[in-house]
Image (cartoon, helix red, strand yellow):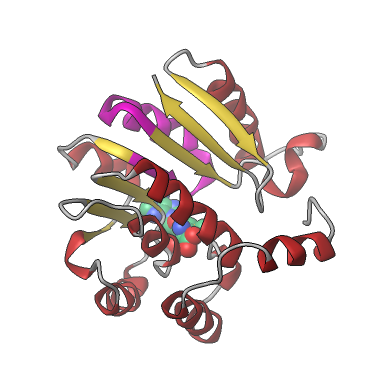
Amino acid sequence: MHFISQELEDYIEQHSEKEPQHLAALNKETYQKILLPRMLSGHFQGRVLSMLSKLIRPINILEIGTYTGYSALCLCEGMQENGQLHTIDIKEELVDFQRKHFDKSPWGNQIVQHLGEALDIIPTLDMQFDLVFIDADKENYIHYFEMIVPKMNKGGIILSDNVLWSGKVLEPLQKNDVSTKVLLEYNELLKNDPRVETVLLPIRDGLTVSRVL
Ligand SMILES: C[S@@+](CC[C@H](N)C(=O)[O-])C[C@H]1O[C@@H](n2cnc3c(N)ncnc32)[C@H](O)[C@@H]1O
């Protein structure tokens, strides 16, 4: 779903930073070889993630939902030299693809891949984060948020993707549509939770920026 016209989207992309060459290559290879390539953040959202990371200058970053590694590499662009990006995905078949592209980047040694169920892995990460990107199964967004808040540094940023869910947040809720139900609750939680301040940006499928107080 396009929240703004395709023409305006094209204009916005044309007047934002170009997609770096290594990310264009990753994007192309994802479309050629991997199922569901639309899951990848893509040029414009990738530049937004990069810009936010450069503004935050995080040391430790956590990503939930690596897929082929596109957003991980965007988030690394603002990471400090002594920083690490931890990224979690449940799909074993993606690990080598991700690693190949991570090792071609300047951040190969700073990226730690975690394979498995995010709900199991997050509690094992013994560190505080400055930046978190939640971009995995929508059913668990509230659980991810609750697990992550105590692991955030004050002033840290939690980014949550797909919070408009193709506009389904405005439609009558269908029986058995757990993802939309949870996203509706999640958006209310972020708005009302005194531990964070939140703005919901109409970028791509909806991206919230929550600052931990
Ligand atoms: C939308 S894609 C991530 C896209 C990526 N962040 C990007 O922008 O390029 C979601 C990913 O989350 C992973 N995922 C889904 N449920 C998960 C879970 N319970 N634990 C860990 N990873 C999960 C999927 O395997 C998929 O690769």
The quarter of the rendering in which ligand 1 is drawn is: bottom left
Q: Residue at x 29, y 72 (%)?
A: 102
x and y percent of residue 104 in the render? Answer: 28, 79
Q: Residue furthest top?
A: 194
Quadrant that contains the N terminus? bottom right
User: For this rendering, which residue is in front, 73 or 149?
Assistant: 73
Image height check: is 178 above or below 24? above
Please check the rendered image and state whether residue 46 is part of the magenta-colored stretch, yes or no: no
- In this rendering, the count of numbered labels is 0
> Is 179 situated above or below 83?
above
Image quarter where the C terminus lies is top left
Residue 151 in the image, given as x and y percentages of width and height:
26, 30
Magenta-highlighted residues: 131-156
Determine if residue 89 is in view. no
At which x and y percent is residue 2?
Answer: 78, 56
Above or below, comparing residue 26 to residue 7 in the picture: below
User: Residue at the spot x=42%, y=17% of the render?
Assistant: 195
* Residue positioned 30% across, 71% down in the render: 95
- 140 displayed left or right of 169: left
Looking at the image, residue 145 lies above or below residue 161: above
| Residue 75 % position (x, y) | 38, 55
Q: Residue at x 39, y 50 (%)?
A: 54
- Evaluate whether residue 93 shows in this view: yes
Q: Quadrant of residue 92?
A: bottom left
Position of 11 with respect to 128 (left or right) is right
Name the one closer to the observer, 119 or 48.
48
Relative placement, left or right, of 137 versus 57 is right
